[in-house]
Image: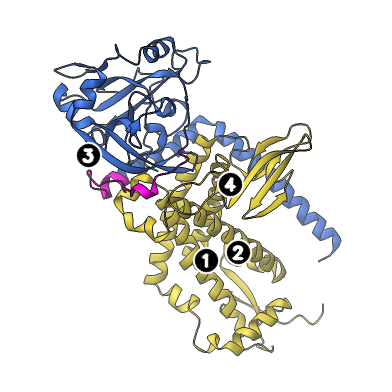
């Protein structure tokens, strides 16, 4: 190949690569294109729901598999005054509120939650970032709590309102952490409100006093510092309307992949 | 110049092969670049079910060396200074900590959420496109007829001969050029039967939802972090294949190859005069 031709080819190659990159960045910023890409989330959710038994369990591990270095992400110690005050009195006046579209709203002390039907499981926690850690969780079965609260027929999602502000810069009031799941996950046997981790009281950095475990989804669905559970018919009007703190910031609401 | 051998045009690639090839080029390129964006969210690899944060087998990070930030890549016990490429990259003065550099990721800036949205959309395109190719290839005999090597082609002597002629960048002309040679066949089969399906299988194994659907698949790979590692290694294999593939496309007759993959028409010399065997 002659030098001229080689130079020409590499010039064309570099220009094409530059155009390609600039084009991709412009498409990322294009809302129509983003809307098109977002349909894949629905396809994935429907496909996984279609081929997976609603009660199919996430893998449970042996005690020897428990990670010694279980990583904590998001808020590690909430600075919100309400949480700080509760922590100072060891959550004596804490009441888990279960409300929204229910016939029998609940207000439960931590002792009530610990006395509720429970489940213990050793599961793998998969962070959206790509890492995994294995931990042992004991918690109240969400299905039993929801049965006690008697969901109204129009309830479609369960929303978990948390104590921690993860984005203090949010000016629209959407800086607090929250997450939501549908009724399939809410009634899944492994979906629990964990109050124990690795046979000890749940540490603050992992969500004390209560952390949602929804084992067939990624880590950000596992809301920490749960204060209030709300049954709703629609996710509109909560936060920025996408069903969770991270979904409000571009992440998928369905975090099964 | 004056004595050019006569050319005949043959139909090299069917319409399905051509369309699925270019859709695959698009999907794999975007999957690779959005995949590197996702990798950058935690630029380290492990073996087994869970991460052992203190001992990744591969990591890319920023490390202060003598008060100066450097990009350090580790592979096992090996340590490489990869400043400007892995770990610490970007224009001088505007360097940032990231696994792969901006020019290799979609989007160029850090956004795990956008990277994932691109990755999972084009993963669907990749899978559907691959299924179309596979089903058509099996039903119409393309895979059996054009890609499976004949017994004669698999003789060690023949394979050795092909390796030597490839290394000398001498390619079949005339009649033997009508079909793929044994190295082409084996390489394409490796990509189509092993690497590309492995990407889908290891990718699905990283999905906690799909783990509940089919727990046996992730066990096959030795756990989620192993699946992530194999996903990365198989992607590396695809990048290596593409690099060699592109070089060979250029040196074995760039325009003829491009025309055949776009229009299907491929020129071969009419006289079968050459030293190669089919």
Cα–Cα span, label 4 and label 2: 16 Å
Q: Is residue B56 above or below residue B151?
A: above
- Identify the image quadrant of residue B242: bottom right
Tell me, what hue is chain A? blue
The answer to whether marks 3 and 2 mark residues whose Cβ atoms lie closer than 8 Å is no
Tell me what residue is drawn at x 78 percent, y 34 percent. B67
- Indicate yes or no whether the magenta region holds residue A68: yes
Q: Residues within 10 Å of mark 1 (few under 14, many from 20)?
A: some
Q: Chain of mark 4?
A: B
Residues at discs 4 and 3 both on one chain: no
Q: Which residue is mark 2?
A: B241
Looking at the rendered structure, which numbered label has been put on residue B33?
Answer: 4
User: Gap between marks 2 and 1, in whole Å?
Assistant: 8 Å
Chain containing mark 3: A
Helix, strand or loop for disc 4: helix
Span colored in magenta = A47-71
Most frequent secondary structure within the magenta stretch: loop
**Mark 2–mark 1 CB contact (< 8 Å):** yes
Q: Which chain appears yellow? A: B
In which quadrant is the N terminus of chain B drawn?
bottom right
Q: Is residue B266 magenta?
A: no
Q: Pinpoint residue B228: horizontal percent, then vertical percent.
A: 49, 51
Q: Is residue A79 above or below residue A197?
A: above
Determine whether label 4 and label 3 are within 8 Å by CB: no
- Few, some or many residues within 10 Å of mark 2 (<14, 14–19, 20+): some
Q: Which mark is residue A189?
A: 3
């Amino acid at each position: 190949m002659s030098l001229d031709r080689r130079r020409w080819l590499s010039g064309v190659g570099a220009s094409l690569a530059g155009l390609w990159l600039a084009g991709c960045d412009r498409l990322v910023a294009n809302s129509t294109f983003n809307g098109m890409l977002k349909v894949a989330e629905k396809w994935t959710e429907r496909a996984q729901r279609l081929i997976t038994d609603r009660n199919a369990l996430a893998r449970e591990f042996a005690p020897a598999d428990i990670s010694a270095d279980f990583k904590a992400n998001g808020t590690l110690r909430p600075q919100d005054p309400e949480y700080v005050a509760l922590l100072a009195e060891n959550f004596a006046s804490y009441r888990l509120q279960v409300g929204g579209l229910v016939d029998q709203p609940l207000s439960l002390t931590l002792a009530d939650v610990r006395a509720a039907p429970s489940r213990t499981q050793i599961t793998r926690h998969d962070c959206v970032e790509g890492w995994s850690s294995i931990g042992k969780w004991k918690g109240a079965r969400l299905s039993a709590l929801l049965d006690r609260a008697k969901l109204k027929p129009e309830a479609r999602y369960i929303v978990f309102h948390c104590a921690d502000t993860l984005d203090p810069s949010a000016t629209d009031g959407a800086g607090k952490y929250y997450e939501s799941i549908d009724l399939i996950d809410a009634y899944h046997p492994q979906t629990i409100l964990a109050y124990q981790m690795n046979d000890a009281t749940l540490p603050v950095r992992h969500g004390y006093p209560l952390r949602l475990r929804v084992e067939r989804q990624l880590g950000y669905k596992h809301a920490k510092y749960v204060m209030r559970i709300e049954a709703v018919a629609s996710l509109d009007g909560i936060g920025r309307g996408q069903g969770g703190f991270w979904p409000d910031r571009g992440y998928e609401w369905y975090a099964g992949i | 110049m004056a004595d050019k051998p006569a050319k005949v045009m043959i139909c090299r690639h069917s319409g399905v092969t051509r369309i699925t090839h270019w859709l695959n080029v698009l999907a794999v390129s975007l999957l690779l670049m959005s995949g590197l964006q996702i990798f950058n969210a935690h630029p380290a690899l492990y073996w087994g079910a869970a991460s052992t944060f203190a001992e990744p087998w591969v990591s890319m990070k920023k490390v202060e060396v003598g008060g100066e930030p450097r990009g350090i890549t580790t592979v096992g016990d090996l340590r490489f200074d990869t400043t400007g490429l892995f770990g610490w990259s970007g224009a001088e003065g505007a360097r940032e900590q990231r696994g792969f550099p901006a020019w290799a990721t979609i989007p160029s800036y850090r956004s795990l959420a956008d990277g994932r949205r691109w990755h999972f959309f084009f993963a669907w395109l990749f899978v559907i496109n691959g299924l179309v190719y596979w089903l058509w290839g099996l039903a119409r005999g393309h895979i059996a007829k054009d890609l499976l090597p004949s017994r004669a082609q698999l003789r060690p002597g023949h394979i050795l001969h092909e390796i030597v002629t490839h290394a000398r960048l001498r390619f079949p002309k005339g009649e033997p050029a009508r079909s793929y040679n044994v190295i082409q066949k084996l390489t394409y089969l490796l990509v189509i039967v092993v690497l590309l399906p492995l990407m889908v299988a290891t990718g699905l194994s990283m999905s906690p939802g799909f783990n509940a659907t089919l727990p046996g698949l992730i066990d096959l790979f030795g756990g989620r972090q192993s699946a992530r590692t194999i996903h990365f290694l198989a992607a590396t294999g695809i990048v290596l294949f593409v690099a060699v593939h592109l070089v060979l496309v250029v040196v074995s007759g760039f325009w003829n190859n491009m025309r055949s993959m776009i229009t299907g028409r491929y020129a071969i010399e009419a006289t079968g005069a050459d030293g190669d065997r089919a």
